[in-house]
């Protein structure tokens, strides 16, 4: 998907909502366990209920890989079911030596037809470059994450210029691609850093997880993160897909997604 196509969808739906399909078979309503593919049955209802309210879906690969072959089949069915105009993100956090990264890129882009994949930058440019060679596809590079231990490395101060490690990642990596094929992960709980991040990458899209269950504040993210082309995909997972443990889970998911979409429309 091109940058302009994504922007057009955001403007059309008045939403920059990304919904994380972190589907845990132990958390879905028990009546779905009678289905041949419970995970896909759950995802299908979530998608039916929310596809008009969001512009992206982000399956977290761990939730599918944990189910072995069955999980990969559920994931592929989910990908085939998501409407084509919706941006799809493989939350895989890959990153390895070049030839291995190339195989990961082929898996997610050629075989499964994701629009984007999350990538870890620790091994440097040659581990990221293979993902950037696919036309119309995106790398979403980890920059400043929302987990508690992100300070272990990401906030370290580097010499001689006193910049943070995540700032070096942003400055260095923006030379590898462009705002047409490279986005960054910035956790919603790091909203106070968004203003400085925008000085480094003013035009790039940012994928911002952490709204909802992790406590991120949408108003702050919008205040410091929006740019002229919106430039944000704000992700919510558990607070939407697990809004209810009962048979009304899809309806409740729709209600939670609609709350976020309405708030987002106020910022656009």
Image: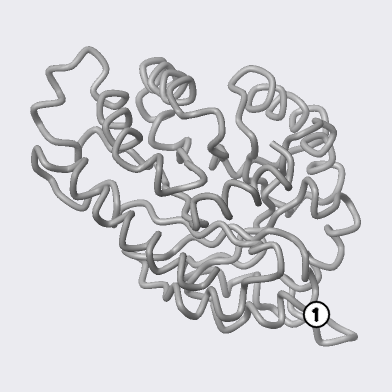
Name the foreground residue: 263 vs 105: 263
Q: Is residue 51 left or right of residue 3?
A: left
Label 1 crowd (10 A; few <14 / some 14-19 / many >=20): few
The residue lying at 27 percent from left, 48 percent from top is 254
Q: Is residue 7 left or right of residue 169?
A: left
Q: Is residue 241 left or right of residue 71?
A: left
The image shows residue 186 at horizontal and vertical percentages of 60, 65
The image shows residue 233 at horizontal and vertical percentages of 56, 57
Q: Is residue 43 above or below residue 106?
A: below
Name the foreground residue: 37 vs 225: 225
Q: Please, what secondary structure does the residue beneath circle 1 have?
A: loop
The residue lying at 58 percent from left, 46 percent from top is 9
Q: Is residue 133 above or below residue 19?
A: above
The image shows residue 144 at horizontal and vertical percentages of 62, 67
* The quadrant where residue 112 appears: top right
- Per the image, the residue denoted by label 1 is 158
The image shows residue 151 at horizontal and vertical percentages of 57, 75
């Amino acid at each position: 998907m091109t940058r302009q196509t994504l922007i057009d969808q955001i403007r059309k739906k008045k939403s920059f909502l990304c919904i994380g399909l972190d589907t845990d078979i132990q958390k879905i309503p028990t009546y779905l366990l009678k289905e041949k593919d419970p995970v896909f049955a759950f995802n299908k209802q979530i998608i039916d209920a929310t596809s008009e309210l969001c512009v992206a879906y982000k399956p977290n690969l761990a939730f599918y890989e944990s189910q072995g072959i069955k999980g990969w089949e559920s994931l592929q069915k989910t990908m085939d079911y998501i409407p084509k105009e919706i941006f799809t993100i493989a939350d895989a956090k890959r990153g390895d030596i070049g030839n291995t990264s190339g195989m990961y890129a082929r898996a997610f882009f050629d075989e499964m037809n994701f629009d984007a994949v999350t990538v870890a930058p620790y091994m440097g440019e040659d581990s990221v470059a293979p993902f950037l060679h696919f036309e119309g596809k995106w790398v979403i590079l980890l920059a400043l994450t929302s987990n508690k231990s992100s300070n272990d490395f990401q906030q370290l101060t580097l010499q001689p210029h006193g910049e943070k490690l995540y700032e070096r990642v942003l400055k260095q990596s923006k030379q590898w691609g462009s705002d047409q094929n490279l986005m960054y992960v910035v956790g919603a709980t790091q909203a106070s850093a968004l203003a400085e991040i925008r000085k480094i990458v003013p035009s790039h899209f940012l994928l911002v997880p952490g709204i909802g269950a992790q406590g991120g504040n949408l108003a702050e993210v919008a205040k410091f993160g929006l740019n002229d082309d919106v430039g944000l995909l704000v992700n919510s997972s558990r607070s939407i897909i697990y809004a209810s443990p009962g048979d009304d889970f899809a309806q409740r998911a729709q209600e939670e997604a609609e709350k976020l979409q309405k708030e987002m429309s106020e910022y656009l």
